[in-house]
Image (cartoon, rainbow, N blue to C red):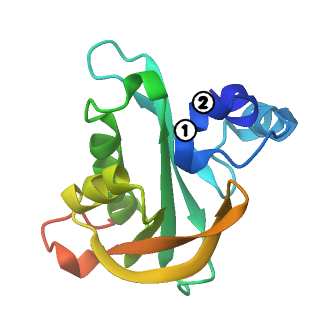
Amino acid sequence: MCDRFATDPEFGGQFEWTGFGSTVEYRRRWEEDRLLGASPYNLVVAASDDDRPVGWVNWRDTDRAGPGAWEIGILIDPNERGRGAGTAAQSLLVDYLFATTPTHRIWAGTEIENTVEQRALERCGFRQEGLLRGHHFRDGEWRDSYIYGITRDDNPNRPRPH
C-alpha cells in the first residue's frame, strides 16, 4: 500500500495525492520499526469480514497545537471506500490514543471540498473548529482546509490511560 501511495495518483485520490514520491523511506521504516517507532506512527486498517488490509491510519507529533495533542490521518484504498472502514478505524484510533497516551486533544485537517471525510470525523465525535485559508497545495493551487478536533472532555466515557 505504501508503494501505491507513493507512485499511483489514483490510490491517494483527489485529496491525498501530492505527487510522485520515493518508496525508499516507507520500506526503510517498515524494516526498522514496522512504522511504529517514530512519528508518524501507522497502523493498518483491516476489512472486518476477512482482515485484508484496506488502508491505514496514522498519528503524528505536532507543535502547531502545542504539547498534549496528536494529529491524525487516514487513507483507505479507493476500491474499499464507502463501506464504513474509515469511520470505524478513526473512531478506534481515537479510543486507542486516549486510552494509551496522556493526550488531551486529537485533531485532523481536511480540505473544505472533502465532505466525506468531514462526515466521518463528525461521526467519530470531532467538531469543526475553524478554517485555515491556503493551507494545502494541490493541483497547482492553494486550498483551504477545515480543522476538526476532539478533546478528552468531549466524551467522559472514553478510555483513559492506566
Relative to residue 33, is residue 142 depicted above or below?
below
Horizontal and vertical percent for residue 31?
A: 78, 31
**Whether residue 102 is visible:** no
Instruction: Write down the quadrant of residue 99 in the picture.
Output: bottom left
Q: Nearer the viewer, residue 58 or 129?
A: 129
Marking on residue 94: none
Residue at 39% in and 24% down? 80
Q: Is residue 145 left or right of residue 20?
A: left
Give the amino acid type for the residue marked by disc 2 in the picture: Glu
Q: Residue at x 63, y 67 (%)?
A: 136
Q: Relative to 24, is 57 above or below?
A: below
Return the residue found at the far top. 50
The residue identified by callout 1 is 13
Q: Position of residue 34 (x, y in %)?
A: 67, 35
Q: Quadrant of residue 22?
A: top right
Which amino acid is tagged 1?
Gly
Q: Is residue 59 left or right of residue 140?
A: left
Q: Residue at x 12, y 67 (%)?
A: 157
Q: Which residue is mark 2?
A: 10
Whether residues under marks 2 and 1 lie with C-beta atoms below 8 angstroms apart, the answer is yes
Among the 4 quarters of the image, the one containing residue 25: top right
The residue positioned farthest toward the front in the image shown: 140
Q: Position of residue 130 (x, y in %)?
A: 39, 83
The residue lying furthest to the left in this view is 157
